[in-house]
Amino acid sequence: MKIVTWNCNGALRNKFEALFVFDADIYVVQECENPLKTNHKKYAKWANNHLWIGDTKNKGLGIFAKDTIDLSPLTWSHSYKDHDVKHFLPCRINNEFNLLAVWTHHNNSPTFGYIGQFWKYLQINKSNLQNCLILGDFNSNICWDKWDRWWNHSDVVSELSEIGIESLYHFFYKESQGKELYPTFFLQRNLEKKYHINYVFGPSKFQDNLKLIQIGEVSIWLKISDHLPIFSHFKL
């Protein structure tokens, strides 16, 4: 099974054909428009088998799969105490494993934005996330950890590890968090402002069956987005 996650930086209707090079079974795409509310016929046809959530029809989080893949939405809670966190899209794949698509959001929170949103989601869904493939744009890296916050990137990675979930990029390349050789994001598409903020996390089943994990070429993908795609190939 081949799975790709990519923040398309909007207007996926004009970019989705670039993904054909991967011939993936599943694409997890951030900042994409709602296929059910587009006038772009080719995009709507390509997105025939999909799940999508978002605040506006122009920018959300989508899971797109080949017609042979069964995507079943899961009704996991996204309410932490008195408010909702976003954006998280869980589903069941072929009734074989769970997948959680992630696009962390500032969500008008000065302290719990981005990785803080995922930390909250983790607290309310920890039992669901065991044996789950978790991937997307986390907008986070250990380099932004703050010493007085217990929802730092490091804390999230540690909590995931406690339930057997590891970053597959770091597992495959034997790199440490914060020491990534391959960035996934270039702020304002500036080659000097590079960060690794997109991830694929998975349990031992995915670690043991990982054939390849690869980040897209800068020279190709930076022309159409400020993020690079992450391609994963599993023997499933």
Image (cartoon, helix red, strand yellow):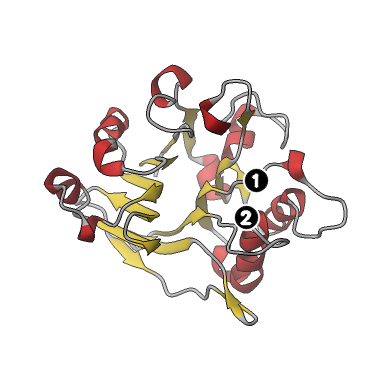
Residue occupying image coordinates x 56% and y 63%: 129
Q: Amino acid at mark 1?
A: Ser
x and y percent of residue 73 in the render? Answer: 36, 68
x and y percent of residue 77 in the render? Answer: 52, 76
Q: Residues within 10 Å of mark 1 (few under 14, many from 20)?
A: many
x and y percent of residue 124 in the render? Answer: 62, 73
Residue occupying image coordinates x 82% and y 58%: 149
Q: Residues within 10 Å of mark 2 (few under 14, many from 20)?
A: many
Q: Quadrant of residue 222?
A: top left
Q: Secondary structure at mark 1?
A: loop
Residue occupying image coordinates x 15% and y 52%: 39
Along the line of sight, which residue is nearer the eye, 47 or 100? 47
User: Residue beneath label 1, please?
Assistant: 140
Along the line of sight, which residue is nearer the eye, 95 or 149? 149
Along the line of sight, which residue is nearer the eye, 156 or 162? 156
User: Residue beneath label 2, please?
Assistant: 114
Q: Secondary structure at mark 2?
A: loop
Q: Residue furthest bottom?
A: 82
Between discs 1 and 2, the one toward the N terminus: 2
